[in-house]
Every structure is written in C-alpha cells, then in structure tokens.
Image: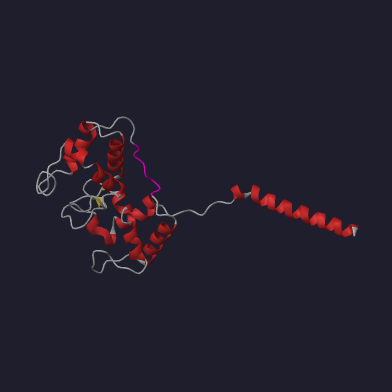
Amino acid sequence: MKQRIVLAAVATSMMMYLLTSCYKNKEDIQALPKVSFRKEVVPIVTAGPCGCHNTSVTVRAVLFSDNRTNTIYYDAILARKSQFEAWVNGGTHPGGGEIDFSPSEKNLIKKWIAEGGNDDGAGCTVTGAVRYTTDILPIYTTSCKGGTCHGGIAVALDYNKMVAAKTALTTIMNTGGSQGHPGGALSITTCTANKFKEWINQGQPQ
C-alpha cells in the first residue's frame, strides 16, 4: 500500500513538472511566419495579371498603384479582399477575360486571408490639427479635380459641400474607396484615408 502511494506521488509530481515546464517554455516556441501583405501580396496585384490596375495612362479599372508616381493604393487593394477570396477559391477575374493568378500566388493569397487578411505595414499616423484649407483642399485639388472628375463632369466641391458629405466621406475612407463615392469606386492611399478620418474626427475645421 505504501509503495502504491509513493508511486502515485512520484507520478503526480512528474505530471505537474511536465505541465508547468511546458507552460514556462511557451515563449521558446517561435510562431510560424505569417504572409506579409506589403512584401508578398502587394507585389502580386501590382504586377503581372493585374497590370491594368497599375497604370493611370488609360484608366480601365480601379488603380492598385500608379506606375508614373510609384504610389501604391494599399487601401484600394485591401478593400477588394472579398473579391480576391472568391477568385482564388474557384472563381474568376471579376473583370472577365483569361486573367488568372498562378497556383502558388493563389495559395499565398488564401493563406494571407486565412490569417486575417491584415495590412502588416499600415503607417502614416496623422497627428496634430487637420484643417480643410491646409490639409484637405490640396488633396482635393490634386486628386479629385479634372475634366472627368469634380469640376468637370461631376459637381465641384468646396468646404460646405465637403462638410455636408460627411457620411459619404466616412464610408469612402473606411472602405478604401470601394463604397460611398457616387461616381464609382476610388483608389485611396492610407495617408489620404487617415487624414480625412482625422479631419472628420476633429469636427471638420476649416
């Protein structure tokens, strides 16, 4: 009887040691690397089969990048995650045609989406006061005005109209330009989205 008690005590002690030892050593187990949105996914959709999304000479699709200015519209790419997901899981290119990703590219995009489909490099933190005159108007002047845009075939915008369009602007910036814009989808950079969001959060000062 005494021998059984001793053996049971030893077994219990070893079990407790193993459990506590494994727990304490959890930090020694390195997590498997995740797919990088900026280093692995973005290069796929800004080249090769997505070429028409990356030139602003003749815009035929929502831009993922502008090869004339080396600008990447990360938000425009992120906003179309659901379309990529449908495509790589048996679907086809949303715009039709024979365009397709390679099997390895599909697997990488699938893995990125399964891991949450997040942007691992979203920066451009906006600090300080953001005003219409000094921060928002320059963006509007360079990116929104033109013969085929606002001031041309679309209504010209000013401060009062921007303030009145708060709901639409919020939707546009929160979806990377895929929703909210009456004239169709837009391509928006993280910096632009963050600046508009902060301007709205600050009460849209002039």
Residue 122 is a magenta residue: yes
- Residue 147 seen in render: yes
Highlighted magenta segment, given as a residue range: 119-125
Residue 182, given in percent of the width and then of the height, sits at 19, 51
Residue 81 vs residue 172, the one in the foreground: 172
Give the quadrant of residue 195: top left
Q: Is residue 104 left or right of residue 145?
A: right
Compared to 165, does 107 lie above or below? Answer: below
Q: Nearer the viewer, residue 37 or 115?
A: 115
Note whether 128 is above or below 141 in the view shown: above
In the image shown, does 38 or 112 lie closer to the viewer?
A: 112
Percent x, y for residue 206? Answer: 22, 31
148 falls in the magenta region: no
Along the viewing direction, whichever of 67 and 122 lies nearer the viewer: 122
Q: Is residue 41 above or below residue 204?
A: below
Please tell me in which quadrant of the rendered image residue 14 appears. bottom right
Question: According to the image, what is the colour scheme of the structure?
Answer: secondary structure
Dominant secondary structure of the magenta stretch? loop
Q: Quadrant of the N terminus?
A: bottom right
Q: Is residue 196 left or right of residue 159?
A: right
Residue at (34%, 64%) from the top-left corner?
86
Expressed as whole percent of the image width and height from the top left, the position of residue 31 reads 53, 52
Give me the residue at 17% from left, 36% from top: 160
